[in-house]
Image (cartoon, rainbow, N blue to C red):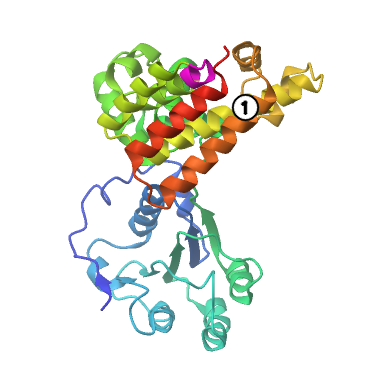
Amino acid sequence: MSTQFNGKYPAGGWPGVYKTQHSRLFITKMPVYFFWGADEFRMKKAVRALCDRNLNPDWASFNYEKIPPEQSDAVIQGLNQAMTPPFGIGKRVVWLADTPLGQRCPANLLTELERTLPNIPDSCILLLTSSNKPDGRLKSTKLINKHADIREFDTIPPWKTEQIEHQVYQVAKEVGLQLTPAAAALLGAVIGADTRRLYNELEKLKTYWTEPKALPPEAVTALVATSTQSSLQLAAALRQGKTDRALSLITDLLERNEPALRIVATLVGQFRTWLWVKLMTEAGERDTRTIAQAADIGNPKRIYFLQKEIRDISSLQLKNALKLLLSLEYSLKQGAPETVTLHTKVIELAHCFKHI
């Protein structure tokens, strides 16, 4: 059975949706959308913004349909609904949630897509969503590309610090908070690509900060839990071969319920950055902009400090450490016990740099 809109359409719009320039991106004549990516929070905000823009509050309970993938003939049902004129005022929104059409599409469904997608009326919106990137080789994907507005909501890798900081600025602007560059950089380091937490922390900071000037990094330090900072301190302890310090930090992180895979992701990002800088430096590259571009570092001024951090260690040590981290990540994903596995690997990682 499909999930019906509950009919209670908030006066201020859907919960958690901000009517900003960003959300106005969804005003378009194209009646078909395909949202994909692993960032579930951002995607849900986009879905709500799309509904907020197209559904009339008084008629939403008649014109909103969410069809889950387990429903029998979900795609056929969705296509049929999308061809049905809306009741009353506003548009009809039909949402095929978690659709597999970007990964597989039987011949009969492809025929229905070819027949329906070009003919969906402007009074209806057909929304397809998936956590997986659509397979560009499939005929169904090519057809969707031709007729749909496709939006990517994938998470940003932790080592892409420039993109993460850009996202911090975007969301801060959306919630109406001005940040200093240092505060934005610190938030990016602390929160990473966790957009749900980013929105929550920025809303909290906005409530706290009533000054007309930009929010400084001291406010972030005071109000935002810095588990990622501890992960970066852990990376530094490992690089320095300080086993006791590293074990103490990993224990603290686990006691604060920091997800093990998030800790490892931060470590992988930091050691990958160090390795790139080391390899470029050993190759004789002196242009900090070139090194920053290769290492995917937004601010070339960081190169001097990174080079200083890894001056006394070799690229081989960093390669070995990165191999251990990737092995650790694989073990955790396979269900290895977190505490024992992390402590064991931390000792091995610190041993890689023990002579320092």
Number of marks drawn: 1
Q: Based on the displayed image, in which of its 4 quarters is residue 289 positioned?
A: top right
* Residue extent of the magenta highlight: 236-241
Task: Answer with left or right where residue 14 lies relative to residue 280.
Answer: left
Residue lying farthest to the right in this orientation: 284
Sort mark 1 into few (<14), some (14-19) or many (20+) by Cα contacts within 10 Å.
many
Three-letter amino acid code at disc 1? Leu
Residue drawn at (25%, 30%), measured in percent from left and top?
255
Q: Based on the displayed image, in which of its 4 quarters is residue 353 positioned?
A: top right
Residue lying farthest to the bottom in this orientation: 108
Query: Closer to the camera, 13 or 131?
Result: 131
Looking at the picture, how far across and down is residue 177, in whole percent? 37, 25
Residue drawn at (55%, 66%), measured in percent from left and top?
148
Q: Does the magenta stretch include residue 308?
A: no
Magenta stretch secondary structure, dominant: helix
Q: Can residue 302 be seen in this view?
A: yes
Residue drawn at (80%, 20%), measured in percent from left and top?
285
Q: Mark 1 points at which residue?
A: 318
Looking at the picture, how far across and down is residue 150, in whole percent? 55, 59
Relative to 98, say whether 347 is above or below: above
Quadrant (top left/top right/bottom left/bottom right) for the N terminus? bottom left
Looking at the picture, how far across and down is residue 135, in whole percent? 60, 66
Query: Closer to the camera, 89 or 228?
Result: 228
Q: Can residue 178 be seen in this view?
A: no
Looking at the picture, how far across and down is residue 103, in whole percent? 54, 70
Regarding mark 1 in the picture, which secondary structure is present there? Answer: helix
